[in-house]
Image (spheres, helix red, strand yellow):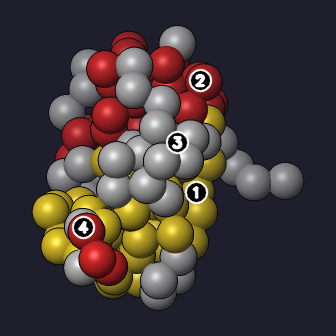
Amino acid sequence: MAQPLQPSGVRNRLLAALPSDVLAQILPALHPVSLTMRKSLAAPGKPIEAVHFVESGWVSIVAHLDEGAQAEVGIIGREGLAGASRVTGVDTAFAEAYVQGPGEALQMEATAFQR
């Protein structure tokens, strides 16, 4: 059985900036996942099933344009999270999110994140 996460072990800067009492409330809903190269975290037009607080590595956000063109519209490192549109209640991805730099993240189910 995995050990519970400890506030002192959090490397994501967004999580680390939370007040300790708030962080303690959400730690049980987070679990570590590996970010392997090209792993898809979200697909355009599909439901966002989980958010990922990046701890190491990075995630590219790529918009799919007309006629098959693509444009990178964002990069997420350990300062943020993939799936941030869930903050505003949007549950469908507008772009693709996939791993460009392997590493680790703390994952939380989208419904738990909304709560």
**Circles 3 and 2: CB distance less than 8 Å?**
no
SS label for mark 2: helix
Tell me which residue sits at (23%, 40%) in the image: 14
What amino acid is labelled 4 in the image? Answer: Leu
Find disc 4 in the rendering and name its residue: 65
Q: Cα distance, mark 3 to mark 1?
A: 18 Å
Find disc 1 in the rendering and name its residue: 32
Tell me which label, 2 or 1, sits earlier in the chain.
1
Q: Residue furthest right?
A: 1
Tell me which label, 3 or 2, sits earlier in the chain.
3
What amino acid is labelled 2 in the image? Answer: Ala
Find disc 3 in the rendering and name its residue: 48
Find disc 2 in the rendering and name its residue: 112
**Circles 4 and 2: CB distance less than 8 Å?**
no
Callout 1 environment at 10 Å: few (<14), some (14 to 19), or many (20+)?
A: some
- Give the side of residue 25 with respect to residue 54, left or right: right
- Give the side of residue 59 with respect to residue 5, left or right: left
